[in-house]
Image (cartoon, rainbow, N blue to C red):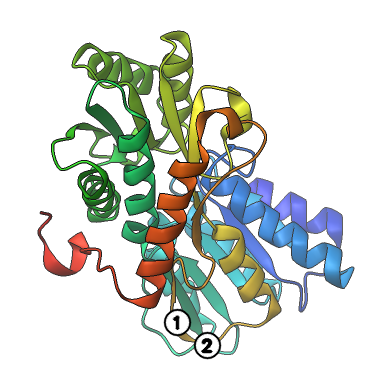
Amino acid sequence: MCASVVLWLASTGSASAEPAIIFELGGKHDKSFGQAAWEGAERWKKETGQPYLEFEIANAAQREQAARRFAERGGDPIVGVGFPQASSIEAVARDFPKLHFAIVDMVVALPNVQSFVYREHEGAFLAGLLAALASKTGTIGFVGGQDIPLIRKVLCGYEQGARYASPKIKVVSAMTGTTNAAWTDPARGAELARTQAAQGADVILAAAGTTGLGVLQAVKDMNLLGIGVDSNQNGLHPGRILTSLLKRTDVAVYQAFKGVKPGITQLGLKEGGLDLAFDENNAPLVSAGMRRKVDAAKADIIAGRLKVIDYTAANACR
């Protein structure tokens, strides 16, 4: 059993009826996916005044160990942040049918599990549109993390948005790897960004966890523009981050902590699960005209007037 989980729980007393959250590799302060989830838990804590349990895994074996230990201590609900935790959440949820669980970015079809999935292609469309509007070379880039359908879905939406803004735009793309390690390799991210810059890309979106931090650093060093992901990363390099594609994992965690509703919950632009970040850090980079085009496309997607292809549903992108 995971000794660190045991010691942590022992130091806090009984976990009965307290919600629990398990962060993926990269942790809760990754300035990306995990941090957004942590902010959702903190929002719940601030509103309720109640504590919650948490654990940041250091290796794959700890996923199920942490979920099981929280369940044994009565944690409810138990939230797994990230698709790699699906199998562990499923296994523990089967063994503890009276407790409630939630999983972010994957579906676990059990009567005591709420599965949060996102329409990432909608937000990525807006990011691609803005990237194309900002590009001076006519070429934009995309660095993904692990090569999985979810990231292909982001790329597909990004390409559609870019071509909606400029039909002749060129999009160059690369995935960091095929294993979970692809999310935590900033050096490789920087290398891929430099390669895409050599191909003419002057705006590069990083959809790669902490690997993306390397992408954004390289973009800053080359005086190009980057697009952050998950959390608002505009402030990492003010004036060099065009925007951030917000994937509001905080919304999922906050909703789960308030009370699990078993089944599949989809989050997109309409539900506030996705958006672009605009603040003082990127204000000089986004003209009023650019913002109007983004806002108009967002309104059309929400209203159903503008259809964005979902790569995972259509298995195609055009």
From the viewer's perspective, tell me whether residue 50 is left or right of residue 192.
right
Asked if residue 245 lies left or right of residue 107, the reply is right
Instruction: Find the distance from the CA under tag 2 to the CA under tag 1.
Output: 6 Å
Q: Which residue is found at the position 37% from the left and 59% from the top?
A: 297
Residue 239 location, quadrant: top right
Q: Is residue 128 left or right of residue 91?
A: left
Q: Secondary structure at mark 2?
A: loop
Amino acid type, mark 1: Arg
Question: Can you give x and y, in whole percent of width and height, for residue 107 in the image?
Answer: 36, 73
Q: Which residue is mark 1?
A: 94
The answer to whether marks 2 and 1 mark residues whose Cβ atoms lie closer than 8 Å is: yes
Dot 1 surroundings within 10 Å: few (below 14), some, or many (20 or more)? some
Q: Secondary structure at mark 1?
A: helix
Residue at 55% across / 59% down in the picture? Answer: 249
| Dot 2 crowding, Cα within 10 Å, few <14, some 14–19, many 20+ | few
In the displayed structure, 197 sits above or below 7; it is above
User: Where in the figure is residue 315, as x and y percent of width and height?
Assistant: 11, 62
- 155 is higher (above) or lower (below) than 171: below
Residue type at numbered disc 2: Pro
In this view, 172 is above or below 91: above
Quarter occupied by the N terminus: bottom right
- 299 vs 189, nearest the viewer: 299
* Residue at mark 2: 97
Rendered-image quadrant of the C terminus: bottom left
Q: Disc number at residue 214?
A: none
Q: Nearer the viewer, residue 34 or 133?
A: 133
Indicate the position of residue 193 as horizontal and vertical percent values: 32, 20
Q: Locate residue 201, reporting x and y percent.
A: 26, 22
Q: Residue at x 22, y 55 (%)?
A: 149
Residue furthest to the front in view is: 289
Residue 59 in sight: no
